[in-house]
Image (cartoon, rainbow, N blue to C red):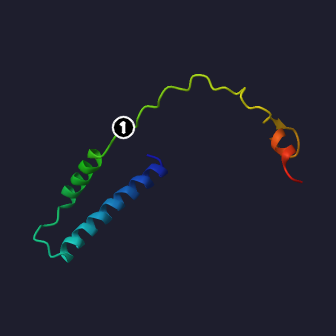
Amino acid sequence: MDNTQFRRSLNVDTSIVNSYIIHKQTLKKKNSRNKPLTALQFRSELANKLIATFTQRKKSGPPPQNVSTLNVGSHLPIKGTYRSCALCSSTKKK
């Protein structure tokens, strides 16, 4: 495992531990009758909830048939210091 992967896994582990601590503190503040989950139960519940909400990416549709590039009229680029349309640059107020 290289350094980057180690840091990422450490960050994930730290986040899980922090959320577990918040879980325990929240139940204490609410004076809940429910006992807080153990660390192992909390991790298991977290994993189950993350897996339950997983959805696969939708497949992309087919590519477009024929895109017409001939229907541009007088809007063609001209050479100059700035690339701009020949029609639009000639009609601009100077």
Number of on-image labels: 1
The x, y position of residue 79, in whole percent, is 87, 38
Residue name at image x 72 percent, y 26 percent:
70
Residue name at image x 34 percent, y 41 percent:
55
Quadrant position of residue 71:
top right
Give the side of residue 48 with respect to residue 55, left or right: left
- From the viewer's side, name the closer residue of 73 and 77: 73
The x, y position of residue 93, in whole percent, is 86, 53
Give the side of residue 69 with respect to residue 88, left or right: left
Query: Is disc 1 surrounded by few (<14), some (14 to 19) or many (20+) residues within 10 Å?
Result: few
Please tell me whether mark 1 sits on a helix, a strand or a loop. Answer: loop
State the residue position of label 1.
Answer: 56
Q: Amino acid at mark 1?
A: Gln
Q: Quadrant of the C terminus?
A: bottom right
Give the side of residue 88 with respect to residue 4, left or right: right
Residue name at image x 77 percent, y 31 percent:
73
